[in-house]
Image (cartoon, rainbow, N blue to C red):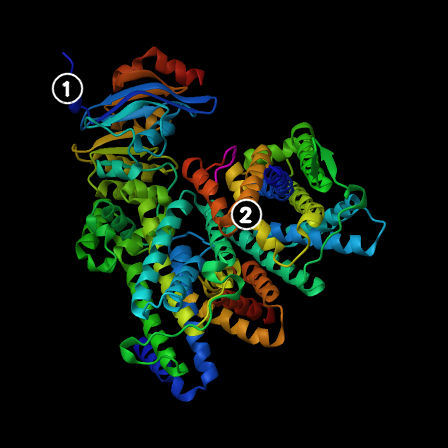
Amino acid sequence: MKRIAAALLAALLLLFPFFAGDFYVNLASQILIAAIFALSLNLLVGYGGMTSLGHASYLGVAAYISALLTSRYGFGHGLAAIISIAGTTATAAFFGVIALRATGLGFLMITLALSQVLWGLAYRMSDVTNGDNGIAGLTRPMPFGISLDSPASFYWFALLVASFAFLMIAIFVSSSFGSSLKGVRDQPRRMAALGFNPWMIRWITFIYAGFWGGISGLLYVYYNKYIHPSSLSTTSSAEALLGVIAGGSGTLGGPVVGAALVLLLKNYASAYIERWNMLLGLVFLFIVLFMPTGIIPGLNKLAMGLRRALR
Amino acid sequence: MTRPMSEHALEVIDLKKAFGGLVVTQGVSLSIRPGERRLIIGPNGAGKTTLFNQISGDLRPNAGKIRLFGTDVTRLTPHKRAHFGLSRTYQIITLFTGDTLEHNVTLGLLGLRPSRWQMWRPLSHYGELATDARRTLDAVGLLHLADHPVSDIAYGEKRRVELAMALAQKPRVLLLDEPLAGLSNTERSQVKSLIASIPRQTTVIMIEHDMDTALDLAETVTLLNYGRVIVDGDRDAVIADERTREVYLGA
Amino acid sequence: MQFWIIQGLNSLSLGGLLFLLSSGFSLIFGLMRLANLTHGAFFMLGAYFGATALRSYGGLNIWMAALGAGIAVAAIGGLFERLVLTRLKTNPLGQVLVTLGMSFIISDACLMLWGGDPIPVPTPQSLQSPTRVLGFVFPTYRLVLVGCAIGAAIMLYFLLERTRLGAMIRAGVDDSQMARAVGIPVSRLFTIVFCLGAGIAGAGGVLGGPVLSAYPGLDADMLPLALIVVILGGIGSLLGAFIGSFIIGFIYTFGTALFPELAYFILFLPMIFVIAFRPQGLFGRVGA
């Protein structure tokens, strides 16, 4: 039964551009990018027990490095991508060393402060980053000479990358390292007494999460052909965190669902309400107060409550 | 004639620990030979768990040394001491409550193996780990509950799982922090027979604050009070010692 | 020479403002173990309230405006604490997330109510004429800001060290479980401290008006500075917040003046230094 459902889903995803219009295909591409970003964040939040409010840093660093190298220094996309990801991973390694001096709220505050420093740099170093204007006029890569400019071709590219990301992260969390990560999340003292090195496990996870955050950043800048400091902002990190929590951080698929929901909400809401930030804030409050384990379990509880009330 | 240093499984030399103005460990020295069964007793607040925490590395002493089989481990982090053959249980149950018993013991086995860094293969690939885990559970009589989550089992059974995890790694030195606390009479005798059956390759050091319960498991006894060693020696000698009675009657 | 003195004074006045901002943050974190991410928004809200009040009522002086704004922001903070935060006692992560959500709500509300253009806050008449000291000319208001910070610091010190309420707060910071056990009404204390912190931030926003004005994004500019001050000075320590504020005031002002593009990066450095070598901050009482 599960196999049939999985096969149907795969077929649906693959054939999507054939029966959906350009607008929806583009939306789907954005969802795929947000999904990778949310999955990478959930490595930290759900599996590692480390809530970060600075994950947008890695999306932004990758995007900016790629944008600068291709538009200003004439690098080809392939080399630019490699340098981008290398730079992002190095940033994650560096930030990890600093942030992991603390746990819990201290960790949260440090990740927030660090990402704000990056945001401030992107904003102020206008000579380099073009400041508030952002960097525009970017191009998409042409892997093996194939153009990614049409919505459908980009969608398939994003689908390929997202599927790969999902697979890699799934392998990671079910590996023995993944089990030790979950163990450190649940009982760090016990794990240390058993011979596991909690700091190293957390740091490696932090770097891996930054890596995939960078991958989503590359897709992001390819899709938009534009990058702006707001992608590094706390709002960006908060949207990803909301997606993870709304979808449910306990599973692999939850953050994907949550990211999709947040993106769809953002898209549809912005047609009617100008104030996306306010809506985001209200949704945050709502989810945390009434559905803290995620929408699916929350809806379940609601349904049960309704059933009881109607009896 | 003094014994060569490496003959001792665990040596604690003049250990001192203070929290601000409160001195919890005052110049504690211990020498424990391999295979020994030592009981550390003392009233509440005597500093027994703090001592254990310093031996396991969870706390850094302000002064003094700790040696495991002759090697100075005072500056080593807890996980490195585990690789040195140190294992411990805690006063509070620190099991992975959402996971099965088998998974708990598997994690216990994984801690010392290089495969713990493996990021590619699923944990289930390591069949020998699962077999070893089940064998360990069988040795403590809990194989029938192997696939149950820890949250489902009784308190006494949880204590046995803790013990199983600690023993699975075949430690050279095992620290048991109040292993019999909160157990019913049947559970207590089960855990006691488990402790009694621990092989001699493992040196066992136990904390209990109720003197009578664990006395028959001990060969040597150390009495702590106010962070100091009051009496130290063979069990019968310590029981007979006047100072022991003073501490317990006066407390 | 003039440059150094002026930047020095700017540093002091920024430090003073930062103290008004971060003292509340530090107290809230210390007592409630809550990283109040709404704090920047409280500051900004106060600034907007004050700006509007001062522009609408010509006769109003800045002190009254600050007091009024402080009370208004404290009330909003109190409502938030009672209605939302108390329901999340068992979910510390959730508490932080709702403060984040609240900050989004407040900042968008300000955008909605006051529009996108910065609203300048007039320097009070009586303090407009510059002060002459040793042949140098100083903008008087900036000197006054330092005085405000010192005044606030003294009042807070008095509150914490010499009153019963302060003793209860300090007990709560040191060990809230124990404090509850001895009968201290900790949840009422939480509300009081949250209101106090929010109110000081709101008043600070007004007092900062003549220097910073009220503009969208003020909250995002101020919050990371508060975070860095508290990381540097240590959580729950008033002295740490005081000294940390002035250190950051100096680093930020001189950094922006000398290396404008790298100002944020320069702030980075003391923060890393502290985290690397003394994670509890210079004067911290509570581990992060």
Q: Indicate left or right for C218 with A304 as reference.
A: right
From the image, give the main secondary structure of the stretch colored magenta: loop
- Residue at 18% x, 57% y is B127
Location of mark 1 (residue): B4
Please state the horizontal and vertical placement of residue A256, each as a whole percent of the image.
42, 68
**What's the mark number on residue A5?**
none
Residue located at (36% from left, 85% from top): A15
The reply to whether label 2 and label 1 mark residues of one chain is: no
Relative to residue C275, is residue A78 depicted above or below?
below
Residue indicated by mark 2 = C256
At mark 2, the secondary structure is helix
Q: Amino acid at mark 1?
A: Pro
Q: Is residue A188 left or right of residue C147?
A: left
Viewer-side residue, B199 vs A222: A222
In this rendered view, identify the residue nearer to me: A254 or A302: A254
In the rendered structure, does residue B75 fall within the stretch colored magenta? Answer: no
Instruction: Report crowding for label 2: few under 14, some 14 to 19, many 20 or more residues within 10 A (C-alpha).
Output: some
Q: Residue C199, percent across and down?
A: 69, 46
Q: Which residues are magenta?
A: C282-288
